[in-house]
Image: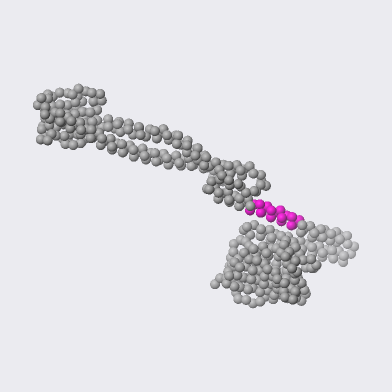
Amino acid sequence: MLPPAYSLKKRLVIVLLSLIGAIWTGIAVYTYFDIRHESEELLDAHLAQSASLILAQAENAIEEIETEHVPQFKEGHRVAFQLWERGTKLRLHSKNAPNTLLSTTTNGFSNAVVNGQEWRVFSVWTRHHENLVQVAERDDSRQDITHAMTMNLLLPLLIALPLLGLLVWLAVTHALNPLDRLGKQVALREAANLEPLQPQGAPREIMPLIENLNTLFARVARLIEHERRFTADAAHELRTPLAALMTQAQVARAAAGDRERNHALDNVITGCGRAARIVEQMLTLARLEPDDAAGQHAIFDLQALTQSVIADIAPSALQRGVDIELKESAETRVSGNSGLIQIALRNLVDNAVRYSPEGGRVQVEVLMTDVSARIRITDQGPGLSDDEQKNVGQRFYRVLGNAASGSGLGLSITRRIAELHDGMLELKQNSGGRGLTAELQLPQIRTTA
């Protein structure tokens, strides 16, 4: 069972918004701590300045000051101060300040707890340690200031996040529109329409997809054309032998004597053999049409393969009185599809035997070089004219005026096998105009140590 399909658009939006959210969170955290640090420094400087002002005002009039409370002002409960004579006698303080030291630290900044609340305290002495001033600010007041500043900076970003999500969705949708159009273009096509897709307006990222689809359409078109051609070829080639079989069967059925009946049945058997050979060769040709027909190459001995082919054809050659000679050569290990090459060699040797006269000779030789292999088959048959050499190898083409049986597919199959091995099939008239030499060249087959 296939896993459920996921939405690329949804995944992209989620990933982008997650990244944006993570970056936004990081910025918010950094901004908060940065504002807190800067505001702490600013407020500490304000405390120090306030303490200095109080100290400067009270330093020359300390004797005239009676212990009293300074009138409370708005938000005054958040700030407190004390003026101590020699650090022991409280001379002046704010209403919300206690009667004891705000902090036991009497020099510089410190944190203290007064009446259950945390305060930030700055303490400073006069030059001769005659008077001590302590100015304090509630810690929660500082936090409120930090939070307010942070929210003022981050609130626009927080409000903009949903808008940013919408913009990301619209941008992703717009970016993926070519894929949607491509999908609709393929979905609306008729089954028989294998024309290439038009890449106009398509982004560069989906061009490989379009090119691969067009390549696939071309391959499917070739396969469909191959099937049509194969069906037409089969109907064309099998019509005649089937009609002949029917005729001979009717003759046998109506025969008055055993001799006539047996003759008709012999013709039926011969026709069945020819039809079987046509079917076998057509199936072989059909297997060679797809792109992967060559299959996987492997190492094999070409000389041994040639000997095996000759051994298979030897009985029919002996029956026709044709001698097959295989010239000796060194062991020839090559790389290729041994099954296909065996079919090609069998077609060439079989053609040479069938077209050779009784008492004739067929010579087979394997020639090797450092980069190629050649199998040469020479017969003593009638040969081919220039016009016949141009047409031979086409499907179902047979030389007229020759009694040898065949379908005209053997050389077509052999030529296709040579092409699958990046090789070629060459036919040459022998010197003297008698006989033909077929040479199967396989330049991409290399010898191995």
Relative side of 85 to 282, left or right: left
What is the count of numbered marks? 0
The structure residue drawn at horizontal position 61% and vertical position 73%, both measured from the top left corner, is 368
Q: How is the image coloured?
A: one colour
The structure residue drawn at horizontal position 45% and vertical position 34%, both measured from the top left corner, is 163
**Measured along the vertical axis of the image, is residue 88 above or below residue 340?**
above
Q: Position of residue 291 (x, y in %)?
A: 63, 57
Name the magenta segment's main secondary structure: helix
- Residue 184, quarter of the rendered image: top right
Q: Position of residue 288 (x, y in %)?
A: 66, 60
**Measured along the vertical axis of the image, is residue 356 above or below residue 264?**
below
Q: Position of residue 11 (x, y in %)?
A: 49, 42
Q: In front here: 148 or 257?
A: 148
Q: In front here: 339 or 262?
A: 339
Highlighted range, magenta: 219-235
**Measured along the vertical axis of the image, is residue 227 above or below residue 112?**
below
Q: Position of residue 287 (x, y in %)?
A: 66, 59
The structure residue drawn at horizontal position 67% and vertical position 62%, both measured from the top left corner, is 416
The structure residue drawn at horizontal position 61% and vertical position 61%, both measured from the top left corner, is 295
Q: Quadrant of the C terminus?
A: bottom right
379 magenta-colored: no
Q: Is residue 36 visible?
A: yes
- Residue 114, quarter of the rendered image: top left
**Which residue appears farthest toward the right when viewing the image?**
256
Q: Is residue 103 visible?
A: no
Q: In front here: 26 or 322?
A: 26
Relative side of 115 to 340, left or right: left
- Residue 46, quarter of the rendered image: top left
Q: In front here: 162 or 119?
A: 162
228 magenta-colored: yes
